[in-house]
Image: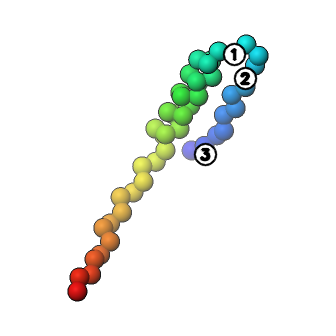
Amino acid sequence: MKPHGVLIVLYGDVQSLDVTGPLEVFAGAASSSAPEPEPRAPRPRARC
């Protein structure tokens, strides 16, 4: 699924919870829906 941008608009008498609540929800949803990176194979090491 293609990610979408979210715009949070602030107005004159806004309270901090009105901004941080939705911001945290969208940030959490974005991080939980992001695919896990594939584990990398260990790099070979040469010893002399």
Of the two numbered discs 2 and 3 in the rendering, the one whose residue sits closer to the viewer: 2
Check disc 3: other Cα within 10 Å, few if <14, some if 14-19, many if 20+.
Answer: few
Q: Which residue is at a point 69% across and 16% down the rendered structure image? A: 14
Which residue matches tag 2? 10
Q: CA distance from mark 2 to mark 3?
A: 26 Å
Mark 2 Cα shell of 10 Å, populated few (<14), some (14-19), many (≥20): few
- Which residue is farthest left? 48
Q: Is residue 25 above or below residue 44?
A: above
Calculate the distance from the C-alpha at mark 1 to the C-alpha at mark 2: 6 Å
Q: Amino acid at mark 3?
A: Lys
Q: Nearer the viewer, residue 44 or 2?
A: 44
Residue 23 lies, in percent from the top left, at 59, 28
Residue 48 point in image, percent of width and height:
23, 86
Q: Is residue 1 left or right of 45 when viewed as pictured? A: right
The residue located at (51%, 33%) in the rendering is: 29
**Residue 34 marker:** none
Disc 1, SS:
loop
Q: Nearer the viewer, residue 32 or 13?
A: 13
First along the sequence among labels 1 and 3: 3
On the image, the x and y values in percent for residue 34 come to 49, 44
First in sequence: mark 2 vs mark 3: 3
Label 1 amino acid? Val
Query: Going by the image, does 30 lie left or right of 11?
Result: left
Q: Quick one: quadrant of the N terminus?
A: top right
Secondary structure at numbered mark 2: loop
Badge 2 amino acid:
Leu
Whether residues under marks 1 and 2 lie with C-beta atoms below 8 angstroms apart, the answer is yes
SS category of the residue bearing label 3: loop
Q: Which residue is mark 1?
A: 14
Specify the label residue 2 is tagged with: 3
In terms of image quadrants, where is residue 4? top right
Q: CA distance from mark 1 to mark 3?
A: 31 Å
